[in-house]
Image (tube, grey):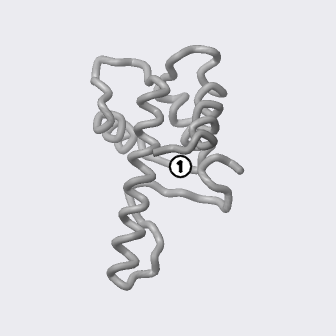
């Protein structure tokens, strides 16, 4: 789903908060999403991670789980925009999370 460049951006964002580890905790993950201008409530984040395969007993989030969660968010955004356009809406996205700012999700 991601281009090589997008995957590199995601990996860099993940590594920036992982301190060299292969995993991050929930607070670090929230920081990554915040840097990407994606704002989720705690309940939404937990639900998203569970949808992507995180088990309740796991304390840490891998890069793979992080990338899957971003893909799911982007897929949901694309579906919402597509549905809104077909329904004659404004074409904007109103969904489970808020995306703010003029930068894209990778800070470019």
**Are there few (<14), some (14-19), or many (20+) residues within 10 Å of tag 1?**
some
Looking at the picture, how far across and down is residue 100, in whole percent?
Answer: 59, 59
Placement of 11 over or under 40, stated as above or below: above
Looking at the picture, how far across and down is residue 105, in whole percent?
Answer: 59, 50
- Drawn side of residue 14 relative to residue 61, left or right: right
The quarter of the displayed image where residue 104 is located: bottom right
- Drawn side of residue 20 relative to residue 50, left or right: right
Looking at the picture, how far across and down is residue 54, in whole percent?
Answer: 32, 27
Residue reaching furthest to the top? 21
Residue at image point 29% right, 38% down: 51
Q: Secondary structure at mark 1?
A: strand
Residue at image point 45% right, 23% down: 62
Residue nearest the observer in this picture, 41 or 68? 68
Placement of 15 over or under 101, stated as above or below: above
Residue at image point 51% right, 29% down: 27
- How many marks can you see? 1
> Circle 1 sits on which residue?
38
């Amino acid at each position: 789903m991601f281009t090589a460049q997008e995957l590199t951006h995601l990996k860099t964002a993940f590594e920036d908060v992982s301190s060299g580890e292969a995993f991050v905790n929930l607070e670090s993950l929230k920081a990554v999403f915040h840097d990407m201008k994606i704002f989720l409530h705690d309940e939404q984040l937990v639900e998203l991670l569970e949808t992507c395969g995180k088990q309740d007993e796991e304390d840490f989030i891998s890069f793979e789980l992080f990338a899957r969660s971003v893909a799911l968010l982007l897929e949901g955004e694309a579906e919402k925009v597509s549905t809104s356009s077909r329904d004659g809406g404004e074409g904007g996205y109103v969904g489970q999370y808020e995306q703010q700012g003029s930068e894209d999700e990778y800070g470019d």
